[in-house]
Image: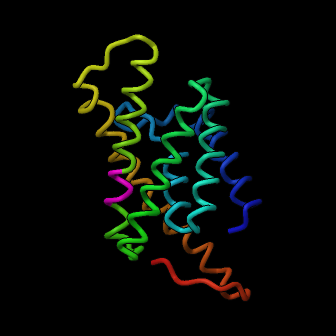
Amino acid sequence: MSMKFKSVLILAVIAFQLTVLPHFAPFGVVPNYTLIFVIAVCLISDGVESVIFSGVTGLLMDLFTGARIGLNILLYMYISIALIMVIDAVYNKRLRVVIPMCFVSSFIYELFFGVLSTLLRGATFYAEAVWKVVLPVALINTVIFIPVYIILSRLRFEKRKRGIKYERQI
């Protein structure tokens, strides 16, 4: 995927996530579609490009949501770096490897984002939020991740037919 295509797609995902998709909250929680997209792009793209893309996406999320500037940037970049390190060590991008990585990444992001955002507001983070919010969001993110990853990897696979070098992801 070209950087222009990713940029347009991430702006569409962010706009869709902040306007339309909060009205469709399965089990009372809103999935983080931007995080799903960032994880999928990190698993498909090269290392440096993924980190830059996740940092820019985190900045856009901070700007559009009104969150503390730097919180999403930091978490997205750390997650992308961790995913790159794990993929380099495992060197296996099959679904049975990628799905648990998505679940763990989503769980860690939601946990750290919840803890840090409540502590920065001066509030108390309750442990029951892990069972009521963090775990359901991580599970829903993982379920939504599967078709997103398959579609994005297929989009990248189609470029091979046009003459661009590529190794099949799935």
Q: Give the range drawn in magenta.
A: 100-104
Q: What is the quadrant of the C terminus in the image?
A: bottom left
The correct choice, above or below, for 157 with respect to 139 in the image is: below
Q: Which residue is drawn at 65% across and 86% down?
A: 165
Give the vertical position of 92 relative to 18 (above or below). Answer: below
Q: Nearer the viewer, residue 1 or 122?
A: 122
Image coords of residue 88 (percent x, y)? 43, 71
Relative to the observer, which residue lies in front, 134 or 67? Answer: 67
Kindly identify the residue that appears in the image at 45 percent across and 18 percent down.
Answer: 120
Question: Which one is in front, 111 or 24?
Answer: 111
Q: Left or right: where does residue 64 sit relative to residue 51?
A: right
Q: Which residue is drawn at 36% across and 40% down?
A: 137
Q: Quadrant of residue 21?
A: top right
The residue under the point 34% across, 52% down is 103
In the image, residue 146 lies at what x, y percent?
42, 62
| Rendered location of residue 8, percent (x, y) | 74, 53
Q: Is residue 55 magenta?
A: no
The tally of labels here is 0
**Residue at the right extreme?**
4
Determine the image quadrant of residue 129. Answer: top left
Q: How is the image coloured?
A: rainbow
The answer to whether residue 102 is magenta is yes
- Residue 46 lies, in percent from the top left, at 58, 68
Residue 88 located left or right of residue 57: left
| Prevailing secondary structure of the magenta residues | helix
Relative to 21, is 14 on the left or the right? right
Against 89, residue 129 (above or below) is: above
